[in-house]
Image (cartoon, helix red, strand yellow):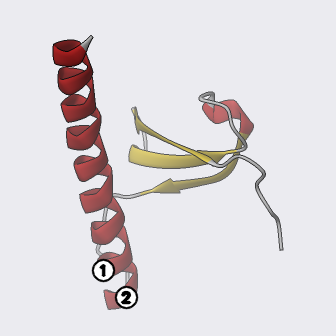
């Protein structure tokens, strides 16, 4: 099993594959990603895969919202 020392999750919008999630070993660059997955659901996906991808998409959106809130709060208290 591969172990990541400092996992970093990056999201991106690829022109061909749609929304993607990349897990890197501490870098923001997707070229160094260990895992790369499209979170768009496709008709050929089974039920479990659709649930898995929709859960990841929800967590990505929540993470974006939390990052905005942190930026807003640090701007108030700085």
**Tag shown at residue 51:** 1
Where the C terminus falls, by quadrant?
top left
Mark 2 secondary-structure assignment:
helix
Q: Residues within 10 Å of mark 1 (few under 14, many from 20)?
A: few
For the point 24% across and 60% down, the residue is 58
* Residue 33 location, quadrant: top right
Q: Secondary structure at mark 1?
A: helix
At which x and y percent is residue 73?
19, 25
State whether residue 66 is above or below residue 49: above
Q: Do the CB atoms of the residues marked 1 and 2 lie less than 8 Å apart?
A: yes
Q: Residue at x 26, y 21 (%)?
A: 74
Residue 25 is tagged as: none
Crowd tier of the residue under label 2, counting other residues whose Cα lies within 10 Å: few below 14, some 14–19, many 20 or above = few
The answer for how far apart the CA atoms under marks 1 and 2 are is: 5 Å
- Kindly identify the residue that appears in the image at 63 percent across and 28 percent down: 29
Tell me the number on the disc at residue 48. Answer: 2
**Could you tell me if residue 69 is visible in this image?**
yes
Total numbered labels placed on residues in the image = 2
Q: Residue furthest bottom?
A: 47
Residue located 38% across and 58% down the image: 39
| Horizontal side of residue 33 vs 73, given as left or right | right
Q: Nearer the viewer, residue 20 or 78?
A: 78
């Amino acid at each position: 099993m591969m172990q990541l020392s400092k996992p970093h999750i990056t999201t991106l919008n690829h022109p061909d594959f749609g929304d993607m999630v990349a897990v890197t070993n501490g870098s923001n660059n997707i070229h160094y990603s260990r895992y790369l997955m499209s979170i768009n659901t496709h008709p050929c996906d089974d039920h479990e895969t659709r649930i898995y991808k929709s859960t990841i998409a929800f967590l990505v959106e929540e993470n974006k919202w939390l990052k905005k809130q942190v930026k807003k709060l640090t701007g108030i208290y700085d």
